[in-house]
Amino acid sequence: MDDLVALAVAFDTTPAALLLPDTDNGEPVPLTETTSGSFAASWQWMRAESPLGEPEAAEEAVPSVRAVQFAEENHPDRPPGSRHSPAVNDMLQRAVQQVIKELERKESDDDGR
């Protein structure tokens, strides 16, 4: 890790940027000899936004409990009393928006009867 951090400092970048590709070529990103992930999933994992192996969901999809817990547990940089990381806030906001859409659709269906 010392060498990785030293290189990141020298190149004015992050360790993640040195470890992962910067463009999506459509191929799985090898993470270990036996583990790989899609470009998006690898970056989300590296940013502690989603665990590896989590099914990739549509942008508006409700996050799994595992994804929310992973994001919460892997952000020790959050100050005490900070309830959610930005990634978790984003996931929760998408979940609320999806519930609102479902309620509006149900209400519209009920009005049409």
Image (cartoon, helix red, strand yellow):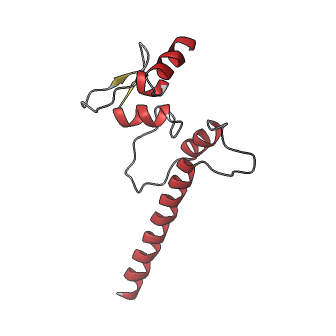
Q: Quadrant of residue 44?
A: top left
Residue 77: give x, y in percent of width and height: 66, 38
The picture places residue 100, in percent across and down from the top left corner, at 48, 71
Question: Which residue sits furthest left?
Answer: 25
Asked if 20 appears above or below 74 in the picture, the reply is above
Say whether residue 86 is left or right of residue 28. Answer: right
Q: In the displayed orientation, state which residue is furthest to the right.
A: 80
Given residues 92 and 79, the one toward you in this image is: 79
Q: How far across and down, in percent of the image, does residue 55 sit? A: 42, 40
Which residue occupies the foreground of this view, 56 or 84? 84
Which residue shows up at 25% across the image and 31% down it? 26
Q: Position of residue 1 (x, y in %)?
A: 56, 14
Residue 85 as seen in the image, left or right of residue 17: right
Residue 31: image quadrant is: top left
* Tally of marks: 0
> What residue is drawn where x is 58% and y is 41%?
71
Image position of 85 with respect to 9: above or below:
below
Which of the image's four quarters has the C terminus?
bottom left
Q: Is 55 or 41 nearer to us in this picture?
A: 41
- Left or right: 58 with respect to 80? left
Query: Residue at 45% of width from left, 64% of height from top?
Result: 98
* Rendered position, 107 above or below 95: below
Residue 32 quadrant: top left
The structure residue drawn at horizontal position 24% and vertical position 30%, both measured from the top left corner, is: 25
